[in-house]
Amino acid sequence: MGKAEKCFNERSSANPRLYKNCSPSDLEKITEQLLIDVCPSTPFLPSDIKLVAGHSFPDIMTTQFYGVEVKSTTKDKWTSTGSSIVESTRSEFVERIYMLFGSLGSNPPAFKCKPYQDCLSSIAVTHSPRYLIDMELSDKDTIFSKMQTDYDVFRTMEEKEKFAKLRRYYIKKAKEAGREEMPWWLGENSAPTLSIFNEQNNNLKHELRIRSMILFPSVFGDDKERTIAYKKISIWMCNRYSLLCYNMRDNFSAGGQIKSVDGKLLMKPYPKIVESLLKSKYAIKRLLENPDVDIISDIEEYWEFNYNESKLYEAWKEMVVDYFKVTPSLKHVPIKDLLERKTLPDFSLINKRII
């Protein structure tokens, strides 16, 4: 491949027009012939070189075990969009792939060759998730180095495993940068269309509120923390369920305070969100004691503490209690006692007293 790169650049320097207007398919054919031309000075035979282009990956095979993917850009640069991360059309036996990249907008057109995995910088989305190519990439800046994995490990994963690993990487990257964002194109259950949360039936809305309270304890916090929680919930809901919500705050608490419990005035009122939490505690317990695949997957992604997988409800309850202890507006709420009560507190007198 080093010989091929050198030969390409020598021919381009001698005749700058030679590759200037090559189409992708033209360049694949030219690459096949050039590889055949350099074969006599390598261990390969001309008969080893096969152009398999079209929907196959890679474009050119050299014996069963080595391949060449041909990419180019009409601009004077070394970056472009590459092939699908799924590699569903990858040749069954190929072990090593090299990237032959032509910067046709350079003067003269220039060529570089690198091992395939060493020039993949990130992921972009066209009609499907695809690698981004950067032929000037350093080893530590490849997408695999940043994800702390090896290309050969990643490429052999099942599609769902690949997407899960990518989700974790991009979510961690966003957190480190202090941004609330999520790769929408990696949603596990995303529908092909977006819908409005408020237009869904009450059962679904209730179910998603329950799951939100399990995953995002900051929804119980002070105004600033709740604002951040609403952003997280909005992104999560869009990513996993393809639902948009334009008034997330109203779906949890319209504000206000609880001034009495069981007919007794409180020394210090509770935030109204406490009522929403307590009214949901039985549903939360049922879900965590009989978890489905979605909630298990989400917990793995969002719970940032150690927990016993067989005692999810206890872990959630402990998380909530700890959260209340360190939140100024919640410290006075005996949340552990309220969660462990056999019956719900009676809030029925609240509205009468306010009226």
Image (spheres, helix red, strand yellow):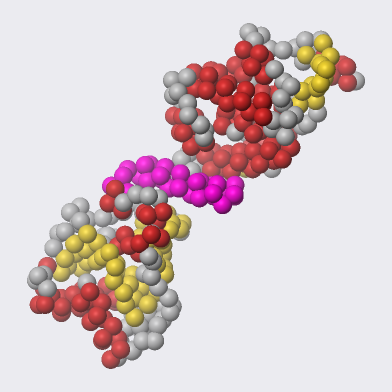
Q: Is residue 235 above or below residue 59?
A: above
What residue is drawn where x is 74% and y is 22%? 332
**Is residue 160 rendered to the left or right of residue 153?**
right
Please, which residue is most extreme toward the top here?
A: 342
Q: Is residue 112 above or below residue 184?
A: below
What residue is drawn where x is 66% and y is 13%? 337
Q: Is residue 168 magenta?
A: yes
Q: Which quadrant of the figure has residue 60?
A: bottom left
Report the front residue among 105 and 319.
Answer: 319
Q: Is residue 79 magenta?
A: no
**Is residue 203 rendered to the left or right of residue 346?**
left
Instruction: Tell me residue 69's x, y (percent).
Output: 28, 66
Instruction: Tell me residue 122's x, y (percent).
Output: 43, 58
Main SS class of the magenta portion in the image: helix
Instruction: Tell me residue 295's x, y (percent).
Output: 49, 29
Q: Which quadrant of the figure has residue 320?
A: top right
Instruction: Tell me residue 38's x, y (percent).
Output: 15, 78
**Is residue 202 rendered to the left or right of residue 77?**
right
Q: Specify the segment rendered in magenta.
A: 154-183
For the question of whether residue 85 can be seen, the reply is yes
Tally of numbered discs: 0
Which image quarter is the C terminus in?
top right
What residue is drawn where x is 69% and y is 30%? 327
Report the front residue among 62 and 149.
Answer: 149
